[in-house]
């Protein structure tokens, strides 16, 4: 399900921005979920530091229950249909940042390119630092789930997941893998890194689903 969105134009850059900051209406009454504090900062968190990457050898793979498995170079990934969205960002550690502008490929566009098989029910994201995270397929098939390579009009900083990260404004941010380099469509659920360590599988900020 995708919430209603509005489009605005950035006067400086002349680019169209889809505003999806009202998606909270689908989940709760308040834009700021319970237990969160709003911040203008963008703290850096990761499990093991920032990995190196080489744009000449970087590869993004789509595998599993799909009609066509994909292997995309950095240039090929950047050539996929993309858009800029204004989103809110909710960290499980208790802070939220409003009005982040991310540019990237919506998850459904990538899924359509690969052709998802009927028996696919779950998605496992992988990353350059060996991080993994999982979500039900229905939670991924939303336009707001982006494979983002830009933040506020600039290349996504390495410490925030550049060259590419997933953003999931309807979930706590650990569901959005930094340094993402692949997705696997699964016929059965498989837990990711933090989920195996007791974090919530559902991760709904408006229900404070932080831990299992």
Image (tube, rainbow, N blue to C red):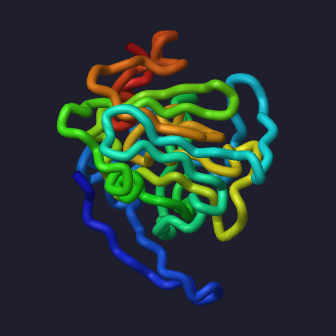
Query: Residue shown at 38%/13% (left/top)?
Result: 212
Q: Position of residue 26 (x, y in %)?
A: 24, 50
The image quarter containing residue 193 is top right
Residue extending furthest left? 118
Query: Residue shown at 63%/85% (left/top)?
Result: 13
Q: Is residue 57 left or right of residue 66?
A: right
Where 32 falls versus 7 (above or below)? above
Where 69 falls versus 49 (above or below)? below
The image quarter containing residue 180 is top right
Q: Position of residue 119 (x, y in %)?
A: 20, 32
Q: Position of residue 47 (x, y in %)?
A: 68, 24
Q: Nearer the viewer, residue 79 or 50?
A: 79
Q: Nearer the viewer, residue 81 or 23?
A: 81
Q: Nearer the viewer, residue 21 or 202?
A: 202
- Report the number of numbered marks: 0
Residue extending furthest front? 68
Q: Is residue 71 left or right of residue 41?
A: left
Q: Position of residue 93 (x, y in %)?
A: 57, 29
Query: Residue shown at 42%/18% (left/top)?
Result: 191
């Amino acid at each position: 399900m995708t919430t209603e969105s509005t489009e605005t134009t950035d006067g400086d850059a002349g680019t169209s921005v889809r505003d999806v900051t009202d998606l909270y209406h689908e989940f709760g009454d308040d834009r700021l979920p319970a237990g969160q504090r709003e911040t203008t900062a963008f703290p850096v968190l990761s499990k093991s530091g920032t990995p190196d990457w080489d744009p000449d050898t970087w590869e993004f793979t789509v595998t599993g229950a799909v009609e066509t498995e994909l292997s995309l170079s950095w240039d090929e990934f950047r050539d996929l249909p993309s858009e800029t969205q204004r989103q809110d960002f909710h960290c499980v550690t208790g802070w939220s940042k409003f009005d982040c502008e991310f540019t990237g490929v919506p998850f459904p566009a990538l899924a359509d390119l690969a052709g998802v098989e009927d028996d696919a029910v779950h998605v496992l994201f992988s990353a350059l630092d060996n991080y993994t995270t999982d979500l039900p397929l229905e939670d991924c098939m939303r336009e707001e789930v982006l494979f983002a390579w830009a933040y506020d009009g600039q290349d996504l900083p390495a410490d925030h997941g550049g060259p590419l990260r997933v953003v999931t404004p309807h979930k706590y941010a650990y569901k959005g893998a930094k340094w993402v380099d692949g997705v696997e469509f699964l016929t059965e659920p498989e837990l990711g890194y933090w989920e195996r360590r007791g974090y919530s599988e559902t991760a709904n900020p408006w229900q404070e689903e932080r831990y299992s």
